Image: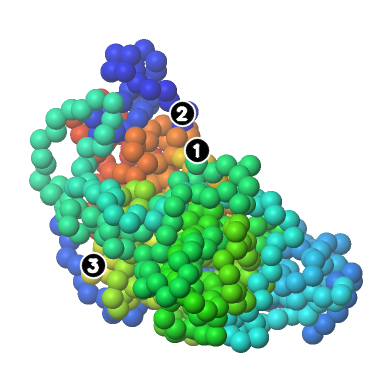
Amino acid sequence: MTKTTKILGASTALAAGILVSGTGLLVQPEAAKAHVNHANKPVQHQLHLSHLDSDAPLIKLSLPKSGSSKRFSGKLQFHNNSRHEVTLTLVRTIRLSNSRLPKRLRLAPGATKTIPLSGSIQARTGFTSVGVVYSSSMGGQSMGVVNIEVKNGKFRPVKTGGFRLGEKGSEAIAVPSNARIGPGVRGYKRFLKGGRTFGKASKAMKGKRRVYQPKRPNQDNQFKPESLKPNIQSRLFNWLPHEWQPSQVISQVVGNYFSLFTPKAVAANTVYKGRFVFRTTDSSNIFLPAVGVGVKAVKGDQSCHHTPALARTTADGNGNFQLRINTNGSYKICYYTKNPFIKIGRKTNSNLYVWGDPARNSIPNSRVVRQPVRHDGVFDIWFEGMAFQTSMTNAGIDPVRTGGNRIRVKFPSEGGDCSGPNPWSCAYTDGKVMIMADHALRHGVMSHELAHQVDNKYHQPRPAGSGGSHSFYGCYSPSARAGMVVREGWANFEMARALGTRGSSRFRNSYRPDLANQLIDSKNMDSNGANCSGVAGSGVNGSESNVSTILWDFFDQRNDNSDSLYYVSPNYITNMYLSLNPDTAKILHTRILNDCKADANKAVTNNGQVCKNIFAQNGGSD
């Protein structure tokens, strides 16, 4: 929909061609013309929830054990392990050139196709990745990626996560030869005290004027302030991407970020200023800040693992940090993928990724910039995780899980971690997340799985029919797979909301400038959901795409056929879903229809008919 200007009143709005209602639905005037009780059933605690299209074809890229980066030979194997015929379309290659790849490839159910691959590798000395990315007609992406090391014009494949970082003999951290850091996020703040608190999520969103609405039956399922009030101990970060200034120099200090834990002074009492950045494993070579990464100082003769910290903190939105170090001996700085929101390791409860600087005897006068020699995609999923966490906290939701349900990410996943013998990406109800190695470059997977963890936190017990194999446009039983349809549909929406904008379901520049304007996970949320009404064993509301595209149409500001309205608040759908805890798509859609039929809205929605048209357009109904 067209972005609107500030509206002064109802009469002014009508004159301008737009009407704003008390419930926060913005509609165009021509569009105005044109809750169920349910029992929650317990679900097994360890039930996993596979990523949004676990039916996607698998791609395996095979390279020789070593070879020249100027010319190599290998092969690509495509395997469609789904029950659907799938068409793959080439999206991009990763550091491959002079390679003749099929732009389109059609695979029958269960089919396998192998093609030879030759070309050259466009990569500088160091650790990087090569591969291909195809979009699937069933939604999402299929990827074939191999991590490699390039040295003296030669390459060799390396195993993801097979390196030991932070241990003796591997402390070297490379300094970027190009000090210019590409545009990225800024303003990742540490709240030492205070912070926003949020009351009940009202069904009447804030518009340009308020209209009293009497309370209706079955509409008292609201947020409890004590349940969703951000935990000040845990909600440490917020991301303000609009504050990013690409011209900022590396040495500039952003805010004052000091350690929360300062030991008693022994001798020195000086502030160490640093910055941690990483190079993307995509085909671009830009550097991005290691937003929110954990940082600590330890004694120079100690390991970065399991040793008391002289000081510790968390990097801000530019990867900047400050530590007040008190020691009479040498010290070193350690970096690790752990903060109060998520922890990433080679196992779900151990083998944290850690990088360590060489020992120092003095405090540098200027800010020290470091980057990991190798990370194999760890920081790609970390960076996306921080973007998702910010999206939730900006919406007033505390996404941090605690205790035995804290979010622990295993990267890379292995066969058997999710359903089936092959590695994949999935989320468990107890906070565990598995991310496949290739999915480090499939941007959207991490956000989707973290959305499941937020759902797991506030939606208990799990709805019946959750989990299992599925695909974005696949049609399933609206009753037997009801939980899967509504949960996966909402997770897809939150993925797009976190990484995109209200104007488009494409990566925004402030998230990843190298991906800007590409469809998030190759999904165009402005397209219609699947029409499952005539599919045997399925029907209306039978696809997760129905839920995703309906929610998106009520969120975005673009006209899309019947989509001629949107909620004023960009955070309303997120809050409404988590307060409602719907077990089916029908319950969720009925809740939206109740807003459309509210006294303040029914005139401009034709008593809800405009909203029903949006449901129907996307294969759903109330």
Cα gap from disc 2 to disc 1, whole angstroms: 8 Å
Residue 295 appears in view: yes
Gap between marks 2 and 3, in whole Å?
37 Å
In this picture, is 276 found above or below 50?
above
- Name the spot of residue 262 as percent of width and height, x first: 38, 69
Q: Which residue is mark 3?
A: 460
Residue for badge 1: 503
Q: Of the residues under marks 3 and 1, which one precedes in the sequence?
A: 3
Closer-to-camera residue (490/264): 264
The type of residue carrying mark 3 is Gln
Tell me if residue 321 comes above or below residue 113 in the rendering.
Answer: above
> For the residue labelled by badge 2, is the local secondary structure a helix, a strand or a loop?
loop
Q: Secondary structure at mark 3?
A: loop
Residue at x 41%, y 32% (from the top left corner): 564
Task: Give the residue displayed 63% in from the left and 66% down from the top.
Answer: 371
Please report contact status of discs 3 and 1: CB closer than 8 Å, yes or no. no
Amino acid type at circle 1 is Gly
Picture quarter containing residue 466?
bottom left
- The circle drawn on residue 344 is none
Q: Amino acid at mark 2?
A: Lys
